[in-house]
């Protein structure tokens, strides 16, 4: 158990709909990262938040958005869903383990199926 | 362009045997390299992290090596067990950023 929690574990929805994925980082971790992993694909970095502020953006579509709240939990909002958005969505939080070196701890993921 | 390539794409070995997975990267300026284990449908779990000054690091039956000159890393698994069946992902970070660049992984299957 990494200490990162994600809800829900599974989500099935129809094309055109909007969903919200939730992540709670490990206690004390200020950074939250979101990743997308499509079937048999590598992890694709979507976005990072640090202490409530957006820090880095990856391959995140305009239909997707995220935020980090004052209690440090984060939500990833996916709208106008398409079949190709079906994937595992992982959240990770990080802590510094050395000078400038950060270890990322991944949550169990949310499996999104768009039908 | 910063990239991480892994080989082989998939590997099947018998329980008890050793195996070596490869990772080549073009990330610059290099900061650190990690190996993660990802069980099917689960989140990745860190096995090792190596900075540019380290050339080997072990975690139980897992030993990672790093050659920063040739930009290559390997993950050696000794005396494989059925529970080693998973995807092994090489991840590289550039200096002055905590953004990670992921390889597509090697899918390892250990058969009895």
Image: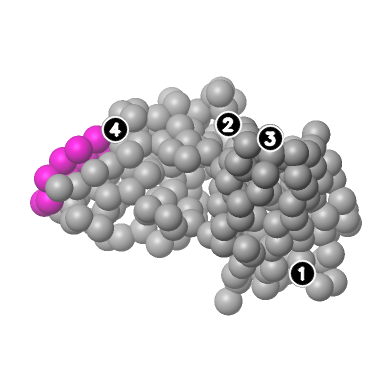
User: How far across and how far down the image is residue B110, in percent?
Assistant: 62, 42
Query: In the structure shown, which secondary structural element does the residue marked by tag 3 occupy?
Result: loop
Q: Which residue is mark 4?
A: A10
Q: Distance between the Cα atoms at labels 2 and 4?
A: 25 Å
**Residue A104 seen in the figure:** no
Query: In the structure shown, which secondary structural element does the residue marked by tag 4 occupy?
Result: strand
Q: Distance between the Cα atoms at labels 4 and 3?
A: 30 Å
Q: Quadrant of the N terminus of chain B?
A: bottom right
The one nearer the camera, B107 or B27, is B107
Q: Distance between the Cα atoms at labels 2 and 3?
A: 33 Å
Residues at discs 4 and 3 both on one chain:
no
User: How far across and how far down the image is residue B88, in percent?
Assistant: 61, 49
Query: In the structure shown, which secondary structural element does the residue marked by tag 1 occupy?
Result: loop
With B104 as the anchor, is A65 left or right in this view? Answer: left
Q: Which residue is mark 1?
A: B71
The magenta span reads: A11-20
Q: Distance between the Cα atoms at labels 4 and 1?
A: 38 Å
Chain containing mark 1: B
Q: Earlier in the sequence, mark 2 or mark 4?
A: 4
Q: Which residue is mark 3?
A: B81
Residues at discs 2 and 3 both on one chain:
no
Q: Quadrant of the C terminus of chain B?
A: top right
Q: Distance between the Cα atoms at labels 2 and 1?
A: 31 Å
């Amino acid at each position: 158990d990494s200490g990162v929690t994600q809800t829900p574990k599974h989500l099935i929805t129809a094309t055109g709909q909007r969903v919200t994925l939730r992540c709670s980082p490990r206690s004390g971790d200020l950074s939250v990262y979101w990743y997308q992993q499509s079937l048999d694909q590598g992890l694709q970095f979507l976005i990072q938040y640090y202490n409530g502020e957006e820090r880095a953006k990856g391959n995140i579509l305009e239909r997707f958005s995220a935020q980090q709240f004052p209690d440090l939990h984060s939500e990833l909002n996916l709208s106008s869903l398409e079949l190709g958005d079906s994937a595992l969505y992982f959240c990770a939080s990080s802590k510094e383990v050395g000078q400038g070196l950060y270890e990322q701890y991944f949550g169990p993921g949310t499996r999104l199926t768009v039908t | 362009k910063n990239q991480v390539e892994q080989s082989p794409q998939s590997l099947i070995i018998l329980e008890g045997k050793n195996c070596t997975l490869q990772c080549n990267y073009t990330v610059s300026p290099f900061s650190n390299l990690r190996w993660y284990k990802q069980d099917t449908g689960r989140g990745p779990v860190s096995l090792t992290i190596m900075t540019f000054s380290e050339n080997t690091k072990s975690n139980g039956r897992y030993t990672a090596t790093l050659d920063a000159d040739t930009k290559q890393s390997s993950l050696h698994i000794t005396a494989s067990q059925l529970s080693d069946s998973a995807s092994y992902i090489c991840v590289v970070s550039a200096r002055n950023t905590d953004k990670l660049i992921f390889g597509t992984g090697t899918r390892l299957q250990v058969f009895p």
